[in-house]
Amino acid sequence: MLKLESVKKVYRKKQDEVIALDTTDIEIAQGEFAAIIGPSGSGKTTLLSMLGAMSAPSEGRILLDDESIYDLPIEKRAEVRQNKIGFVFQTFNLVPYLTAIENVQVPMMLSQKFKTERQERAEELLAQVGLQDRLHHKPSELSIGQQQRVALARMLANDPTIILADEPTGNLDPETRDQVLAFLRQFNEEGRTIIMVTHDLSAAECARRTLRLSEGRIQAGSEQDLLKTA
């Protein structure tokens, strides 16, 4: 379970102060699929970064399985990020000079898995996302949708329990967008917790729960009401 307790994030530039996330309390249960919607500048990506152990709150605590993430030593926090959390980005962040199978192996290299194990796991994951015939293609040799599927396979490399997706359908055509959402639903059905930031209201409807973030505050209301006001 992920839990925010009175979390606030403030950015300061010279004498100016910007509240990216105001005092916020949220609980996201294990196995939940939550979408976070809201206009640009509302604090969505900031919230995702804090949940992903990448950006400490200015105030409050963020707990994962009842353990305060930002009270952990830096090394332990990195282990949490590496072993429990998978990231999906709008820009994919693939290494351009590595093939698909090499890109998927990158997280496993960081966790020091043996080469044979890495290769077998990468092949299995690429087959899972329908790219078994593109193992040795570099990103420039793949379509946009295929690049996103490589990114999904890489995200699964260390078998994370939590997936944080930042606008995962933002650069995709409608058909590929539907494929990515289908994969996210599949991962959720496998028991993974998914938190997705999106401007795509129809994508948000795929989630089981919708949170609307506006001016750094979480807005309450039914899913239908939140989607109408997004």
Image (cartoon, helix red, strand yellow):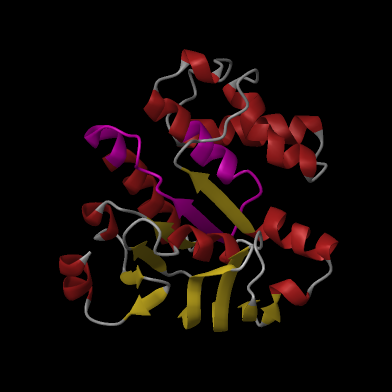
Q: Residue 82 in the image: x percent, y percent?
A: 70, 53
Q: Quadrant of the N terminus?
A: bottom right
Is residue 170 in the magenta section?
A: yes
How many tags in the picture? Answer: 0
Q: Quadrant of the C terminus?
A: bottom left
Residue depicted at 38% across the width and 77% down the height: 218
Residue 20 shown left or right of residue 213 in the figure: right
Is residue 64 in the magenta section?
A: no
Looking at the image, is 5 positioned above or below residue 202?
Answer: below
- Can residue 138 be seen from the camera position used here? yes
Q: Residue 181 in the image: x percent, y percent?
A: 33, 47
- Can residue 65 be seen from the camera position used here? no
Q: Residue 126 in the image: x percent, y percent?
A: 52, 31
- The range drawn in magenta is 149-177
| Residue 31 or residue 171, whichever sits in front | 171
Looking at the image, is 26 positioned above or below residue 213?
Answer: below
| Residue 96 or residue 28, whichever sits in front | 96
Q: Residue 15 in the image: x percent, y percent?
A: 61, 68
| Residue 104 or residue 139, whichever sits in front | 139
Residue depicted at 54% across the width and 15% down the height: 137
Looking at the image, is 154 positioned above or below residue 213?
Answer: above
| Residue 95 or residue 10, whichever sits in front | 10
Residue depicted at 40% across the width and 77% down the height: 217
- Furthest residue in direction front, as rendered: 15
Residue 182 shown left or right of residue 175 in the figure: right
Residue 40 shown left or right of residue 200 in the figure: right
Looking at the image, is 10 positioned above or below residue 5?
Answer: above
Residue depicted at 36% across the width and 54% down the height: 185
Question: Which quarter of the figure has residue 57?
Answer: bottom right
Residue 150 shown left or right of residue 106 in the figure: left
